[in-house]
Amino acid sequence: MTNQITSVPKIVYDFIEFHNNNLHVYDELRRLAMQLKRRGYSQYGIKSLFEVVRWHRALNTSADDDFKLNNNYGAFYSRILMHFEPQLKGFFRQRASIADDYPLCEMVGRGFLWGISDETDND
């Protein structure tokens, strides 16, 4: 008998699709979180970082850019960041979420890791 998820909510699939099409969002959230960590923060809210990503995007694109960062993806990003970035374990405040019900890190799989830049954060 195989162990498989038979009913995955649309938001989970939407997040994975968004992530795969916007790998720069993970990189930017990671960069911002690492900056805060280096400055002595032990915990921070992902939604605040979302607003910074949106602000940077607005400064660097035209008003007709259709980029949208769904607030509902915060729980997903916080969990995969803390999973794939050992320095960020426990960094994001969390509430119970649908993101806890699915193996996100397995679902995004190896392809997810290819999206992470190898740039060193020098800020």
Image (cartoon, rainbow, N blue to C red):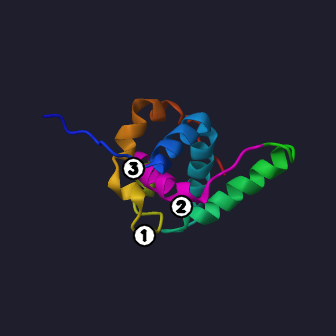
Query: Is 12 left, or right, of 70 in this rendering?
Result: left
The first of marks 2 and 3 along the sequence is 2
- Label 2 to label 3, Cα distance in Å? 16 Å
- Label 1 to label 3, Cα distance in Å? 16 Å
65 to 41, vertically: above or below: above
x and y percentages locating residue 55 in the rendered image: 76, 56
At a point 46% along the width and 68% down the height, the residue shown is: 93
Classify mark 1: helix, strand or loop: loop
Q: Amino acid at mark 3?
A: His
The first of marks 1 and 2 along the sequence is 2
Give the residue number, with chain letter if any, for mark 2. Answer: 37
| Mark number displayed over residue 83 | 3
| Mark number displayed over residue 15 | none
Query: Is 31 left, or right, of 107 in this rendering?
Result: right
Which segment is the magenta one?
66-84
Q: Residues within 10 Å of mark 2 (few under 14, many from 20)?
A: some
Q: Amino acid at mark 2?
A: Lys
40 to 121, vertically: above or below: below
48 or 122: which is nearer to us?
48
x and y percentages locating residue 79 in the rendered image: 43, 54
From the image, give the main secondary structure of the stretch colored magenta: helix
